[in-house]
Image (tube, rainbow, N blue to C red):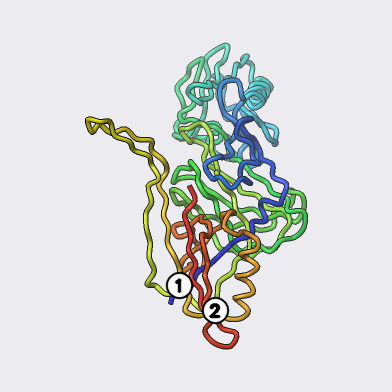
Amino acid sequence: MSKLLISYVNDWDAGTVTASSEHPSFPAINTQQRWYKKPWRSKYGAGSSWGLFRITAAKCKIYFDEGGGTLTATLTVGDYDTTTICAEIKAQMETAGTLTYTVTYNDATNLFTIAGSGAFVLELTGTVNAAWNALGWTSGVDTGSAASHDAEEIRIHTEEYIYCNYGSVKTIEDLIIKNHNLQSTAIVTACYYSDAFITLVATDVFTWHAETIGQRVSRSYQYVAYKIEDPDNPDGFVEIGRAWAGSEFIPYYGFNPEHSSERKDPSLTSSSDDGQESSVRRSHYREWDYAFDAITPADRITFATMFSVVGNTLPFFIVEAPAADDIGTTAQYVKFMEWPEDHLAGAYWKMKLSVRSER
């Protein structure tokens, strides 16, 4: 028998959700929608000033040489977008040096450019608390002396956050992200705070997967955020479709491994008199079932509660044979179709759950 994990109540949906940046057509509250193809996206596009650039004490120095030796510009610690960080770089380089600087961000290439009224060198070998990586200079080799320098890699942000204030302390056992555009090099971290997103007290780092990222945890907090670091995403933005943070129910008895599965294609086809076909393609889905040869009286009560909450209209997550931590490859977003019960003896019943994958 294989165990089945079911997470059917999403505390994320009841919370107040905000983001470090968002495109007006793809707000953070989209992560509370049941439709995982309706995402949140970080701010992007021409004239948008793009995403969050967080400058910390560990990444605030710009080392450069106007011809008389190393100069150091120290950026003020804080949060910026491309417009404000360009202004800050200009101000601090002009404070440290004698040239006049123009700092720009190209909305088409996602590259920073630092230009001066005369030639200068960017000393990328200066790495102590350097801001180079945050701005897209990554080679670690000093530039030549020139009046203008383009960044070496695109940068759309340093990181992004989606914040959720649950309103009260919630016990969190399953964190899941369904549908995203994150690269395999992206770092996704669940961050837990003891107050309103000021004091970070714990973290959980997710394992990346192409479609669904999921982690089993054991946390009790009111303030939780997903931190996303994907600064060179070629899309120019990061996106998340469905965010999930809930508790889990694992029936005492596992399901019978002999169960059916059927793939469905609801596409429409029609043929002309001469046999020429046309079609309207629709998303494929799958239907399958789980047979529980027995369920305990306590589990039957929990199943009844679950059915009253989700019925056959609200989607939720299930995980077959769940691992102790990473569930990203096995978490499935589904709806119930039917759940017939048959009495065995006394307070014991058996049950067959039929589910359908969400589209």
Query: Disc 1 and disc 2: Cα gap in Å?
Result: 10 Å
Return the residue nearer the eye: 252 or 58.
252
Amino acid residing under circle 2: Ile
Dividing the picture into quadrants, the one containing residue 311 is bottom right
> Do tag 1 and tag 2 residues touch (Cβ < 8 Å)?
no
Residue at left offset 51%, top offset 59%: 337
Res. 221 in view: yes
Q: The residue tagged with tag 1: helix, strand or loop?
A: strand
Hey, which residue is sitting farthest bottom in the picture? 346
- Above or below, 66 against 158 in this view is above
Res. 53 in view: no
Amino acid residing under circle 1: Ala
Q: Which residue is mark 2?
A: 295
Which image quarter holds the N terminus?
Answer: bottom left
How crowded pointer 2 is (Cα within 10 Å; few <14, some 14-19, many 20+) is rated as: many
Q: Which residue is mark 1?
A: 291
Return the residue nearer the eye: 295 or 321.
295
- Above or below, 294 against 290 in this view is below
Left or right, 209 with respect to 90, comes to left
Left or right, 279 with respect to 51, comes to left
x and y, in percent, of residue 98 in the image:
64, 16
Return the residue nearer the eye: 65 or 61.
61
How crowded pointer 1 is (Cα within 10 Å; few <14, some 14-19, many 20+) is rated as: some
